[in-house]
Image (tube, rainbow, N blue to C red):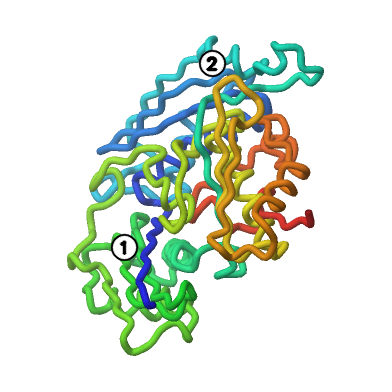
């Protein structure tokens, strides 16, 4: 049976991703000065303005406004008439400390209060968390989302390196892959919408995007005469960034994970330190699922973890290998429980999540990157 599946990605200049990047940059700034910082930071971007809010408890003293302006500059926004200008935009900051009620459960878990010999942190909130991996790509990720991420990243590369010198930072990509019996066969459709200077004509933009972006990324064997290309299908994308559309931290959760190919838990990632299990446990669930596939226990694997606020150990663990398992799922689950410490302390220590790594996670997907601790392959 043949079927189509579609995933999307966005560039770092997309208003939502700009907010994610600001929030994760603030998180990293605090962790660089105090690795035990508790951070839950959200950002909003709108016309000529960035609003930063949330709860932060830390010994560090950070110039948040400078962090925000540096991020906007790094992304490439410098024109208030087209998107936003890092030099002139208004920045509002409204930060408070973490609630003492939440801290009570995080600092000392229910197990510790009930007499456990281990001093365990509790989960920072209740949450359901999913991790996924498959053998479709060398990154152990679904093909549609990996192609979309690589195309979005290439859009940024050709802009910053001047290969296509009339592009602006905002953009998004969508890739549709045709499958037969769950095996990817070809790319059916590619959609690219990219912000550009008004002076450029659409014929030139279409030609450049196909030749300098798409054909540099998508393997030639996946493209054929029936592949459809929609390049800026509205015909114009001059006004972009926060001037064209507001942005908000945590709104691109499907882009951040598996492009809709697997389920997503209850929380977003960016701006949250590792005591928030909707981030850290999602990284651990991906780590486990990837290693189930890499160790050839299954060709496809989805893990669910469930937590209660203030409780260290997950209240439930679930595994689904979609009938691709080489050994019984019960045995895989036993191996997981024997190998991995799924408490917040265990996750943080195993994946080294007190370090300022989070800016590296923000753009082009949190998964499938070789330079992150939770993407390493181990034997178990």
Q: What x and y, as percent, mark residue 34?
A: 67, 25
> Residue lying furthest bottom in this view?
225
Q: Residues within 10 Å of mark 2 (few under 14, many from 20)?
A: some
Examine the rendered structure and indicate whether residue 226 appears above or below residue 147: below
Q: Which residue appears at 48% of the width and 48% of the height?
A: 74
Q: Residues within 10 Å of mark 1 (few under 14, many from 20)?
A: many
In the image: residue 97, left or right of residue 114: left
Q: Which residue appears at 70% of the width and 42% of the height?
A: 351
Name the residue beneath numbered marker 1: 194
Comparing marks 2 and 1, which lies closer to the viewer? 2
Q: Which residue appears at 65% of the width and 58% of the height?
A: 370
The one nearer the camera, 380 or 100, is: 380
Tell me the element at label 2. Answer: helix
Q: Are marks 2 and 1 in contact (CB under 8 Å)?
A: no
Q: What x and y, as percent, mark residue 223?
A: 41, 83
Name the residue beneath numbered marker 2: 102
Which of pointers 2 and 1 lies earlier in the amino acid sequence? 2
Q: Quadrant of residue 243?
A: top left
In the image: residue 91, left or right of residue 200: right
Q: What x and y, as percent, mark residue 322?
A: 53, 60
């Amino acid at each position: 049976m043949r079927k189509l599946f579609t995933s999307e990605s966005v560039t770092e200049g997309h208003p939502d991703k700009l907010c994610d990047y600001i929030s994760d940059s603030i998180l990293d700034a605090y962790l660089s000065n105090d690795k035990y910082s508790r951070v839950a930071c959200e950002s909003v971007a709108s016309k000529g303005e960035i609003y930063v809010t949330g709860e932060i408890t830390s010994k560090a003293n950070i110039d948040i406004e400078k962090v925000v302006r540096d991020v906007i500059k790094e992304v490439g926004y410098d024109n208030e008439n087209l998107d936003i200008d890092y030099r002139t935009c208004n920045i509002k900051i409204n930060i408070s400390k973490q609630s003492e009620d939440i801290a009570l459960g995080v600092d000392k878990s229910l197990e510790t209060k009930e007499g456990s010999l281990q001093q365990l942190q509790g989960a920072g909130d209740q949450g359901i968390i999913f991790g996924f991996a498959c053998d479709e790509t060398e990154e152990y990720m679904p093909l549609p989302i990996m192609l979309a991420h690589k195309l979005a990243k290439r859009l940024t590369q050709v802009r910053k390196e001047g290969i296509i010198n009339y592009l602006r930072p905002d953009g998004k990509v969508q890739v549709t892959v045709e499958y037969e019996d769950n095996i990817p066969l070809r790319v059916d459709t590619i959609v690219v919408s990219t912000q550009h200077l008004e002076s450029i004509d659409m014929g030139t933009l279409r030609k450049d995007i196909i030749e300098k972006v798409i054909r540099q990324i998508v393997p030639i064997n996946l493209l054929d005469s029936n592949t459809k290309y929609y390049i800026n299908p509205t015909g114009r994308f001059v006004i972009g960034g926060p001037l064209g559309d507001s942005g908000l931290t945590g709104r691109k959760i499907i882009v951040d994970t598996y492009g809709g190919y697997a389920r997503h838990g209850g929380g977003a990632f960016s701006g949250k330190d590792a005591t928030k299990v909707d981030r850290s446990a999602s990284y651990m669930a991906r780590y486990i699922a990837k290693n189930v596939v890499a160790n050839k226990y299954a060709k496809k694997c989805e893990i669910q973890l469930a937590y209660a606020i203030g409780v260290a150990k997950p209240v439930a663990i679930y595994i689904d290998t979609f009938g691709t398992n080489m050994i019984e799922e019960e045995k895989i689950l036993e191996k997981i429980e024997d190998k991995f410490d799924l408490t917040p302390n265990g996750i943080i220590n195993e994946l080294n999540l007190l370090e300022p790594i989070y800016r590296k996670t923000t753009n082009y997907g949190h998964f499938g990157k070789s330079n992150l601790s939770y993407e390493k392959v181990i034997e178990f």
